[in-house]
């Protein structure tokens, strides 16, 4: 039974020293320790929150950048496309113009050639008529001499004319 | 009374377990004695008779002290006026007595291990089984006068508790200093070892059980936790400055439980008291309910007291019993077995040391939480 009978001395000393310990630790240990832990937890929380905010801000900026990039790319594509169509238009126009100009030149040349041809033909006709007249004069002259000879001459002359 | 029943049954259980252990051991001794009896039959028969005659006092056998495990173990787990180191070396502790005439101070060394009486200022004192008794004029112990003398000595348990308190103060003031030195930075060294435990007490014991009013009770909870834990650990330490069964002493657990009871009842709000004096039951049940609730006020801290005391004392008894096996069998061959078991038990006791401190603090927080809870 002695084991379970609290002795007055030990009760007294335990009580006194436990209260002293409680007061001492409360003032010199628990207050600063719990305060410091609390403060640090708060600062960690704050830092984490700030980091979260920064992350969101970062994400926002990145998205914005992406947007800008996309826009710029689209704009560039647009410009390139426009330039291409413009170039194609100019090229086509030039081709068409060249063709028109060429055909005009050809037309002109043809007309010139025609004119020349006409002139030449007129001259040939002139000469033929002059020659015919000359031949006819000579034939008339020789006819007077000899009928056969005249005929032969005419034939000869005609041969010459045909060669021309 | 109800709680008295618990008290007695716990003690009985402890005593039964212990008696069974001792009975088992004595059967073994008899078996050994019978083996021995072939060689020295006369001696052992003489020893047995002598033991029967002299009762519980040790007898001489082969010029050696007879080993009595019960006495040794009980001496170790009980309080003492000496701090025993080893062999016959021990440290005398101051004796403080409160007599009707005044206080008496002297060293327990004057008793020479209970062999001599000491003549103080008012009485002559004798050490009987580690209790200080007053010796009357006839040279006999005067029981009536002894009862009047209150023993406030710095006993082994008190001294061991002072050592623990000194350690706690040194450790935690240094930790607090490192918090001041390293404001807002990561903990380091001892600080980083103790901080998780402090945070554990706060986040896993105080907050879930008490709620948002926890901050007010943190100093008490932390002090209780570390006081019990340090004393438990020092109790596991086999020699000075440990070895005392401080938390396994009913006086200490009584004070701790009393502290919890006072804290709980001082902070009890109107709902707590309403629950006790005007519970939500039909009025004709009040004659039963109110006494039951009033007993509840006592029985809750009472359970705390018995739990801590029984757990730590049981641990000490088991370790000491295992060590005693070596001396009971009087052979070194059993030593490896004993040591292996003791090692196992010590590791288990390390866990128990933490667990009991945790449970005591947890239940204290639970009771406080029940007392300060706001009902709707």
Image (tube, coloured by chain):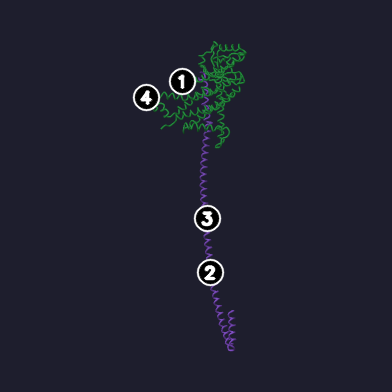
For the residues carrying marks 2 and 3, which lies nearer the camera in this image? 2
Query: Disc 2 versus disc 3: distance between alpha carbons?
Result: 39 Å
- Image mark 4: chain: B
Q: Secondary structure at mark 1?
A: helix
Mark 4 on the same chain as mark 3: no
- Chain B appears in which tint? green
Report how far apart the C-alphas of labels 2 and 1 lie in the structure.
132 Å
Instruction: Check residue B5 in the rendering and tell me which mark sits there, or answer none.
Output: 1
Residue placed under numbered mark 4 in the picture: B284
Please tell me which of labels 2 and 3 falls first in the chain.
Answer: 3
Between the C-alphas of marks 4 and 2, the distance is 128 Å
Circles 2 and 1: CB distance less than 8 Å? Answer: no
| Mark 4–mark 3 CB contact (< 8 Å) | no
Chain label for disc 1: B
Q: Colour of chain A?
A: purple
Q: Earlier in the sequence, mark 1 or mark 4?
A: 1
**Local crowd size for mark 3, using a 10 Å CA cut-off: few (<14), some (14–19), many (≥20):** few
Labelled disc at residue A57: none
Check chain identity for marks 4 and 2: say if they share one.
Answer: no
* Nearer-the-camera pick, B127 or B98: B127
| Helix, strand or loop for disc 4 | helix
**Which residue is labeled 2 in the image?**
A103
The disc numbered 2 marks a residue on which chain? A
Q: Which residue is mark 3?
A: A77
């Amino acid at each position: 039974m002695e084991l379970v009978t609290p002795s007055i001395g030990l009760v007294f000393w335990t009580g006194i020293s436990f209260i002293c310990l409680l007061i001492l630790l409360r003032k010199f240990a628990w207050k600063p320790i719990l305060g410091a832990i609390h403060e640090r937890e708060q600062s960690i929380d704050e830092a984490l929150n700030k980091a979260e905010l920064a992350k969101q801000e970062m994400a926002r900026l990145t998205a914005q950048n992406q947007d800008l990039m996309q826009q710029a790319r689209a704009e560039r594509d647009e410009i390139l496309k426009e330039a291409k169509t413009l170039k194609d238009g100019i090229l086509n126009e030039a081709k068409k113009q060249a063709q028109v100009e060429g055909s005009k030149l050809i037309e002109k040349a043809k007309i010139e050639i025609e004119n020349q041809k006409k002139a030449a033909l007129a001259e040939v006709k002139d000469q033929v008529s002059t020659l015919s007249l000359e031949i006819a004069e000579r034939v008339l002259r020789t006819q007077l001499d000899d009928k056969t000879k005249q005929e032969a001459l005419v034939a000869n002359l005609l041969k010459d004319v045909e060669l021309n | 009374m109800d709680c008295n029943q618990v008290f007695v049954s716990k003690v009985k259980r402890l005593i039964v377990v212990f008696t069974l252990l001792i009975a088992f051991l004595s059967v073994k001794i008899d078996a050994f004695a019978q083996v021995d009896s072939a060689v020295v039959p006369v001696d052992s028969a003489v020893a047995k008779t002598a033991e029967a005659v002299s009762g519980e006092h040790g007898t001489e056998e082969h010029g050696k002290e007879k080993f009595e495990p019960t006495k040794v173990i009980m001496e170790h787990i009980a309080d003492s006026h000496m701090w025993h180191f080893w062999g016959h070396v021990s440290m005398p502790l101051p004796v403080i007595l409160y007599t009707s005439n005044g206080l008496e101070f002297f060293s327990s060394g004057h008793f020479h291990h209970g062999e001599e009486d000491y003549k103080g200022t008012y009485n002559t004192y004798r050490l009987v089984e580690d209790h200080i008794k007053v010796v009357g004029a006839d040279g006999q112990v005067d029981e009536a006068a002894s009862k009047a003398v209150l023993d406030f000595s710095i006993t082994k348990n008190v001294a061991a508790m002072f050592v623990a308190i000194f350690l706690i103060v040194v450790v935690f003031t240094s930790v607090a200093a490192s918090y001041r030195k390293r404001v807002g930075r990561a903990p380091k060294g001892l600080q980083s070892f103790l901080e998780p435990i402090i945070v554990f007490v706060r986040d896993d014991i105080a907050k879930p059980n008490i709620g948002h009013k926890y901050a007010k009770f943190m100093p008490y909870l932390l002090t209780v936790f570390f006081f019990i834990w340090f004393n438990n650990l020092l109790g596991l330490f086999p020699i000075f400055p440990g070895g005392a069964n401080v938390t396994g002493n009913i006086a200490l657990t009584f004070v701790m439980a009393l502290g919890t009871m006072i804290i709980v009842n001082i902070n009890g709000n109107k709902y707590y008291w309403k629950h006790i004096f005007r519970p939500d039951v039909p009025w004709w049940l009040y004659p039963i309910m109110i006494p039951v609730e009033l007993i509840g006020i006592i029985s809750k801290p009472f359970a705390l007291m018995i739990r801590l005391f029984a757990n730590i004392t049981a641990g000490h008894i088991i370790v000491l019993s295992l060590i005693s096996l070596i001396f009971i069998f009087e052979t070194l061959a059993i030593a490896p077995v004993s040591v292996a078991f003791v090692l196992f038990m010590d590791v288990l006791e390390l866990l128990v040391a933490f667990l009991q401190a945790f449970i005591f603090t947890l239940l204290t927080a639970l009771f406080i939480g029940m007392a300060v809870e706001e009902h709707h």
